[in-house]
Image (cartoon, rainbow, N blue to C red):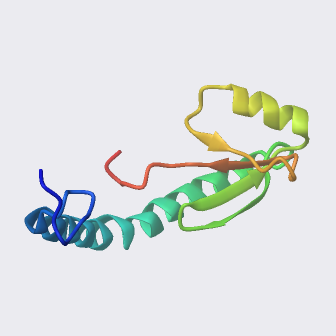
Amino acid sequence: MESSRLNSTWGGNLVDMVRFKYILEIIEKRILSATPGKVGKVLLDELTGIGDSYPELISNVRGRGLMCAFDLPDGDKRDAFLSQDVGEQGHDPAQRRSVHPFPPASEHQ
């Protein structure tokens, strides 16, 4: 494809650029605006319930939207938890006890 005055990822194809703009708008309206709040509330409610049932294991449940976290008693228990196949998880090395679950952004996954 010959370069045009609208150089872009699509080689200046204006139709593809406009199409992608509308795809992004749909993603923002349908997925990114409402779903993280819904999924995050379910996640936070579930983590809080587990923490209430097992306060000796899970504490300091916190979060908003999809950014949730909880603490385990110590780094060894956190590392053992992270080594299990329990879905995608993360941790902040500066916070030795914290676990940050990464749930899917879609409520249909």
Q: Residue at x 38, y 67 (%)?
A: 32
* 58 or 83: nearer the viewer: 83
The quarter in which the C terminus is drawn is top left
The picture quadrant where one finds residue 54 is top right
Q: Which residue is located at x 55 percent, y 55 percent?
A: 43
* Residue 22 falls left or right of residue 29: left
Judge whether 63 appears above or below 75 on screen.
below
Residue at the location (71% across, 26% down)?
A: 83
For residue 78, what is the image quadrant?
Answer: top right
Decide which of 73, 12 is in the foreground and name it: 12
Residue 61, quarter of the rendered image = bottom right
- How many callouts does the rendering have? 0
Taking 59 as reference, is 84 above or below it?
above
Report x, y in % for residue 94.
87, 52
Q: Position of residue 59 (x, y in %)?
A: 81, 54
Q: Closer to the camera, 37 or 51? A: 37
For residue 75, above or below residue 60? above
The reply, left or right, for residue 45 in relation to residue 84 is left
- What percent of the width, then of the height, locates residue 34? 37, 71
Q: Residue at x 13, y 62 (%)?
A: 16
Q: In this image, 101 relative to 94: left or right?
A: left
Residue most toward the left?
15
- Which residue is more in the foreground, 70 or 27? 27
